[in-house]
Structures are given as structure tokens and as C-alpha cells.
Image (cartoon, rainbow, N blue to C red):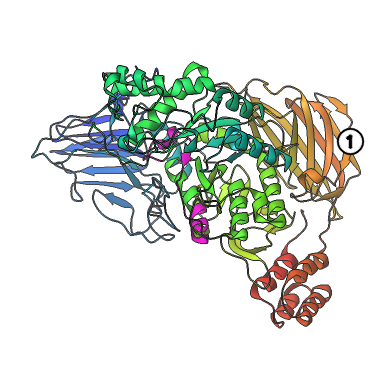
Amino acid sequence: MFSMSDGRPAPANPDAVVTGDTYRFTVLTSRLLRLEYSATGTFVDERTQAVVERDMEVPPFTVTRHGEGVEIVTEHLHLHYAGGPFSSSTLSVTLLRDACDPHYSTWKFGQEYPQNLPHRGNLLGTARTLDEVDGAAPLEDGILATYGFAVLDDSHSILLSSDGWVAPRPADGPTDPPSQDLYFFGHGRDFRGALRDFHRLTGPTPLIPRHVLGNWWSRYWRYSEESYLALMDRFASEGIPLSVAVIDMDWHLVDIDPEIGTGWTGYTWNRELFPDPPRFLAELHRRGLAVTLNTHPADGVRRHEERYPEMAEATGIDPETGVAVPFDIASRAFVDAYLRVLHHPLEEEGVDFWWLDWQSGGTSAIPGLDPLWMLNHIHFADSGREGKRPLTFSRYAGVGSHRYPIGFSGDAIISWDSLDFQPTFTATAANVGYSWWSHDVGGHMFGRRDVELAVRWVQLGVFSPITRLHSSDSPFTTKEPWSFGERAARIMTEYLRLRHLLVPMLYTGAWAAHTDGVALVRPMYHDYSRTPEAFGVPNQAMVGEHLLLAPLTSPEDGESHLATVTAWLPPGSWVDLFTGARHEGGRSVRFHRSLEQYPVLARAGAVLPLLADPHADISARPETLVLRAIPGTGTSHLIEDDGSAAPEAEVMRFEQSLTVGDDPALADLTLSCERLSGPAVAGVRGVLVDLVGVESLEHAELTVNGETRPVTVVGADRDAEALLAPALRLDLGQLGLEHFTLQVRGARRRERDLVAEAFALLDVAEIAFVDKERAWQAVQTVEGLALVQELASIALPAPLRDALVECAAARPAW
């Protein structure tokens, strides 16, 4: 029977609990309180769908009782309870420290608070699906708010027993006030602290396998073994790397007898299309692809299925009757047979994980049990058997769903409005720990052909948690890059190759999500919670440790052929990942980009770990590692492991410093590496260093364990990574990352050619030649405010004029 070996009750430390006849308050941390009310005095210590851990280190607090009520004071919070059912007059919590709104420093049960973001309100969480959504969708509340407090209501969630099965909560009496089980987060603007407490309470984000961080191919299409493999080979011949092959529902029988239902649910291979499934799956594996199959389980198992007899017997049905085995997620016998009979044999044939596409409501035979949540729970647990790293691919089913990655956001409409909402939707999900959304890159259905939209969606997808190309079964909505014309195909290909180069950095972010609750893609206010500007750019996000993403989600201007976005740059220096231009932070800027470019900036001083070859096996640690150094002073990390189900992290730290001498065009640079913890799993491998914005150098010296080694200057022209900003490549040879120091003296910066950049912008603009000539003359002869004034006097489209000012304002890499 289905079970989870780590199942256990989750009572809090008794020293943290303050109890009365009908209430129980638990001081989980000085800023996290559990608030319970039960007219019968019946309280829950079991794990729930959302909460799996309550035994935390008890902070200092005081308790003062008065009649039926009680006051609890921690370092950060003051709870006041007057007795009786919870209401706005009986229960309140006041922030004693870090109150961040002069009018709302006290939370009262049942009171509503203004919701007018970005100025005030709950910062929201995520939603179950984007199915058939064209643009924005309503979002649930999250655990972060501008007020500094938020409440997680766990009053109605299902309980988890010690073996991982489920049970309903104790029922209230017919005349009793409703029971309450709430968690109060009072962290002020310490959003990182709130998320740490949230993950202690609800469980860590699991560590995903490396291969899911590459490009996924998915399409709702009637493929055959021959056509699917031919398509995979076409991707390879086009130089587009893939790591996951998704087979939508037509892998199984769909044309069935109407008397027994539709073919939406199925578990039997269509052997007209896939005559030898193990051979087909083996061929995909041979091409370096993990495989997931789509399943819609709602219709149960009908008599046409190969495994119907065994399923019928396992659930007490005589197979001779042909009676369908109903989908019953609340039945332990059904769940056991569902996994053992239907899924395990297909996994033995070569299926790596499952795409659970539940679209059939939220009720089951157990009151309060959402079948979607239960499917996620059992599949994720089952996928980890036999020492595998667990993984599933399904829809969001409420708070706590972060324990079951990866999320499928559903069938969004192909439109600019849908694209515009996805960055916000992705980032905001991090407010409830949901780090691993996978969207249909390019949109799923309807809409219209729009090449620019398709390119911009791929560019966003490359900097999203998961990059999965997908579309409907219309012959006109396919997402193969070569179907969009030569220019678009070239751009998409370059960005999809870049996605694979980024995997070492992305996997480091996956470890941060797992151990520290820091989402790979997150809102700006997670990192800059005390800066008002961080709340005003909902589409903008931090990606990993050091990248800033400012998505382009509206069409380009028809005359200048530039798309525009307004971004806020935090204090410090930020270097464009693709142009190498430096922008000073602490201000808002407008970026203007042609179709080939995208606004992604790296923090000055960052060291970005990359692959050297986009076609390398991303499921393994890279045999050659590229350290892309953004000039400046800063600290960065690389985390790797041995790929096992429960690995120990090997953590490397990079320190970079930059010193500029009397000649501002020359600098000395030091880059050091030190292994901080974990086993040396990577061993010796090739290490390359890319010095961004460096034209040449006078001398480079590498020290490894006190020994000086030669450094080879490879050069600055590399076709493989032409998309990224120019950099000087150094070859450090074969070495481990235990400890080394690279010292560079006399690095000469690559100067920007403003005149050439301006010419490129003006050349493609569809405006009067005389206006182009005047603008180009101005760029060549004046600068600063005089240039701004001169350009303002010329009849230029606003995006073009602003782009010229942006070029003039940007600086070299240091």
C-alpha cells in the first residue's frame, strides 16, 4: 500500500504552547505564531497539506492571563486575546518592531486591509492555473504584505497521518462556532526571514534534477515514433539543445468506443504510432533526453485498457463484467493499484516522470480533499522510490504545493497581454515558496501569428524557472524556431543555447531554493524590501544570485523597431549581459532593445558559472567550467553535487576585486576560489575565465596551493557565445576548485563605440533620412545635456531618441 517512510506527527515543543479551554496559541518563532480556536477544545497536532513541521527552537516570551483572555509578548509581537470565538474585538497582534505602515501596525482577526498595490496590500501568491486566461488572472494571498504581517489560514486542510495517508479534520458541532487554525507572520519587511520561517513550517523546496533546467520540447500533437525522433534530430541538426521530451496525450489510445467515454484518459500505448515503446523511449534517452508522458486520470480505467483486468481485480471488480474502475483518489486500494499497475510498468519501459494534467474539479470522497493535491502528493512520493530523486509535473494545489515540483501553469492564450502577465505571475509565486513554474513558452492556443511575440516569449522563457516550448494541436501554433523565419530562428536558437550555458548558475539557484528558501526567480522586494521602488516593478525580477531581469512584454515601436521597458536598478553598478554597457543603480531607467537583445543585467563584481558548450550533457557536472567575471568587487557561489537522490552540496565561493589606477582604462583584477563545504565531487576539470569588457592584459598569474601556473590568453572572439557581451577568455587549464587565485595586471577595458552604436540604431529606423543625419551628427559632435537637448529638437520617434540617450549615458564595464 502507498506510504511515506518519513511520515510523522508534527506537534510543537510543549514549552511554546499557551492553552485555554477553547484556545491554543503556539510561539513558533518570535515572529511566527499559531492561533487556534475550537469550541470543543480539540486541536490538531498532525501534519496537514500545508504544514509539516512545528517543533522549532522556542524563543523567549511572556504570558499574562486575565480571566478568559491572555496576552503573549515576544521580542517582535504582542498578542492580545479577550476570550471567546475569534473576532476583530477578541484577537489582535501588534508588531513591536519593524512596523512599516504608520496606519496598520496591528492585525485584527477578520478585519480587511487596503489592497492598492504597490503602495499597500498583501503582496499575493499564485493561482491554480492559467487555463484559457488572456492576460492577468486573480491571485491568492501570500505570506508577505506591505504592512509587515499576513496570515496563513490552515483551518480547512486535510490531515496527514504517520504513513502519509490522509484524514479529514475533526468536525465542528452543528451549533459550534467554526474552528480556526491560523499562522500569523509578523516579520515586518524582513521578507527573507518570513520565507525562512515559512519553509521551516511547510517544508523545504525539493532539489530538482539538473536535466529539468534545460530546454523542454512539448506539443499537443499526434506524433509517431518516427516523426518524434525525426523532430528531435532536426533540433540537433539546427544546433538547438534539448533536455526533456514531453509526449502529450496522443501517446495512448484516444479513439475509443463512445459507449465507455472519451479518450482523454488513457494508459495503453497507441501501437500504430509507437509500435515498440521501450525502443522509442530508449532512443530518446540515447539522445540525452529525459521523458515525461501526459496523463489525465479523471475517467479511471475502462475495459479497453491493457491493464484493465489487473486494475479491476485489485479494486474488487470482476474483470468479466467490463465495469469501469472509477478514479477514486480517496481509496487506498485504488491508489496502490493506480501506481503499481498503471504507472510502474511504464516507468520500467523508460518513462522518467509524469505530467499530471488534472482538470476535473476539487472534490473527492474525503471531505476537503482536492484530488489534484492528492495526485501531486502520491506521485511525488512514489517517484522517489528505489533511491531516485523525486520529481513530478503538475498544477498548483494550494499552499504547500512547493513540495511537489514542477508546476504546470496551464493553457494560456497566445497574446501580448498573456506575455505581460507571466513575469509577475512567476515572481509573485515565490511569495508562497512556489519556485518552479513551467509555462507554455509562446502561449498555448488561440491568438494570432506574431513573430515578434514568439521571440520575446522565448527570451523570457530562457530566464524563467523552466523553459518549455508548448502549443496546442492547431497546425498553425507550433513552436519550432525555424517555423518563424530566418531572423527569428537565429535569435531563438541563440537564446535556447544560452539557456543550457546557464545551467551551472541555475542549479546553484536550485540549491538556494532548497536550503535557504530563496526562489530562483523572485520579486525585487525579496532582495530590496525596504526600498519603495522595488514594489513598483512587478514584472521585474532577480534571477539567481546576481542577474536582474527586466522583461520586454509589449510590441516594438513601428518606426524605430525598438521595444521599451522601464526598469528600476538597485544601488550599485549593473552590467548588461549582452552589450557589456554599465549602468549606475539607485534609479529608474528606460531600456530600448532590438529583437536580438533583451534587458538582463548582472551585478558588478559577479562571477557567473557557465557551461563551455551548450550541447554538453547538462545532467552531469560540466567537464569544462566557464567563470564569467563581471568587473567589480563582489562574492559569488557555485553549488554542485553527485546527482544522487539525497546529495551533499559542494559549495564554492568566488571573490572578485577590481582596482583602477591613475589611467581609468587600466585595472588590476583578482579572482579567487575557495571550497567552503561538502565533498569535492567535481574533481579536476577545465576552467576558463571570461573577463567581461576587457580588451587585453599585461600579465596574468594563477596560484594553486602555493604553486604558480601559466595562464593562456585565448582571445576575445568566440562564435559559440556571440550572444553574450565581449570578453577576454583565459584558460586556467585543468584544476580543481579547492582553492586558487588568479591575478590580472594591466587589464585594458574595451571602449564603447557610441558613434557605431548610434548608427546601428538610426540605420534600421524607418524615418526621414535628414532626421537620421541630424541625429548622427549630434551624437558625433556633442555630449551630455547638450546632446539630450539637440536630440529633443529633432523629429525622432520617442523610443529612438531615448535609445540614443541610453547609449550616451551607459559606460564601459568599469
- Say above or below: 665 vs 204: below
Res 8 seen here: no
- Where in the figure is residue 531, as x and y percent of width and height? 51, 56
In the foreground, 655 or 309? 309
- Where in the figure is residue 638, as x and y percent of width and height? 65, 33
In the foreground, 716 or 367? 367
| 421 is within the stretch colored magenta | yes
In this rendering, the count of numbered labels is: 1
Q: Quadrant of the N terminus?
A: top left
Identify which residue is drawn at 72% across, 57% down.
487
Amino acid type of the residue tagged 1 in the rendering: Thr
Report the residue marked by disc 1. 712
- Residue lying at the far right in this picture: please name it: 698
| 11 is within the stretch colored magenta | no
Res 697 seen here: yes
**Bounds of the magenta span?**
396-423
Identify which residue is drawn at 75% across, 36% down.
613
Q: Splitting the image into 4 quarters, where does residue 215 fall?
A: top right
Identify which residue is drawn at 68% across, 50% down.
482
In the foreground, 703 or 609? 609
Q: Splitting the image into 4 quarters, where does residue 682 fall?
A: top right
Q: Secondary structure at mark 1?
A: strand
- Is residue 314 left or right of 276 when viewed as pictured? left
Q: Residues within 10 Å of mark 1 (few under 14, many from 20)?
A: some
Q: Splitting the image into 4 quarters, where does residue 581 fall?
A: bottom right
Q: Quadrant of the C terminus?
A: bottom right
- Where in the figure is residue 802, as x and y percent of width and height? 67, 71
- Where in the figure is residue 356, as x and y percent of width and height? 43, 35
- Residue lying at the far left in this picture: please name it: 175
In the foreground, 344 or 159? 344
